[in-house]
Amino acid sequence: MRRVRQTSGQLQPLAPLVAQTLQQVGLGSVAWLGRLVQHWEDIVGPQLAGVTRPDRLRSRVLFVTVSDTIWMQQLMFYQSQLLQNIRQVFGDIPVRRLHFVLAVASPQPVQPAVAKVPEPLPLTATEERRMMDDTCGIADSELRESIRRAWRQGWQAGR
């Protein structure tokens, strides 16, 4: 294997060296798959990126893991469009066709989605009045507001 010269003490990006090394040992498809994973959302869009994941490349077939059967069925109709999108990003690619595979059931989704926390419900007028009455005797304003926030959160969490 060829040694890389260090040039003028500057740090060099590691990705090109890793890709070159993988290519030299016959694992160029691993490097390409890594780049594909990085650009997957740009290629398929955020909605499909949430339910799919490029998994492996074997004999010029890209295996794509899909979260459920409905999406898998839909994707079969869009195979040529997805291949075209991949070619637009990478140019000449080592893929002839796509094969969709259903994800194995696991405790985590294929692509963990960021769950939106629902807005807490406001306190009722009775709860608000009780909280204000029970904390109005606290002289320290910071402590009083901290207790009120904690009280609000406790009631809202109980709903």
Image: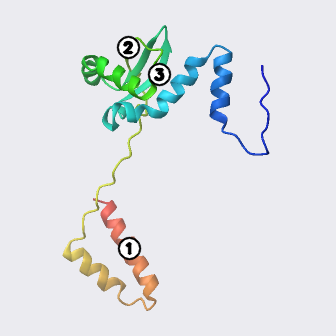
Is the residue 11 above or below the residue 25 in the image? below
Q: Judge from the rendering whether residue 101 lies leftward or rightward of residue 122; answer left or right.
A: right
The residue sitting at 31% across, 24% down in the picture is 68
Badge 3 amino acid: Asp
Residue 110: x, y in percent?
41, 31
Q: Quadrant of the N terminus?
A: top right
User: Mark 1 highlights which residue?
Assistant: 149
Mark 3 Cα-neighbour bin, 10 Å: few <14, some 14–19, many ≥20? some
Front position in the image: 81 or 115: 81
Instruction: Please give left or right for residue 43 compared with residue 133 in the image.
Output: right
Quadrant containing the C terminus in the rendered view: bottom left
Viewer-proximal residue, 46 or 157? 46
State which mark lies toward you, 3 or 1. 3
**Which quadrant of the view contains residue 139?**
bottom left
Tell me the SS state at disc 2.
Answer: strand
Q: Which residue is mark 3?
A: 55
Q: Nearer the viewer, residue 68 or 140?
A: 68
Q: Please tell me whether mark 3 sits on a helix, a strand or a loop.
A: strand
First-in-chain label (3 vs 1): 3
Tag 1: residue type?
A: Arg
Classify residue 83 as left or right of residue 77. Answer: right
Helix, strand, or loop for circle 1?
Answer: helix
Residue 122: x, y in percent?
24, 68
Q: Which mark is residue 32?
A: none
Q: Residue at x 25, y 23 (%)?
A: 70
Residue 96, quarter of the rendered image: top left
Q: Which residue is mark 2?
A: 99
Q: CA distance from mark 2 to mark 1?
A: 53 Å
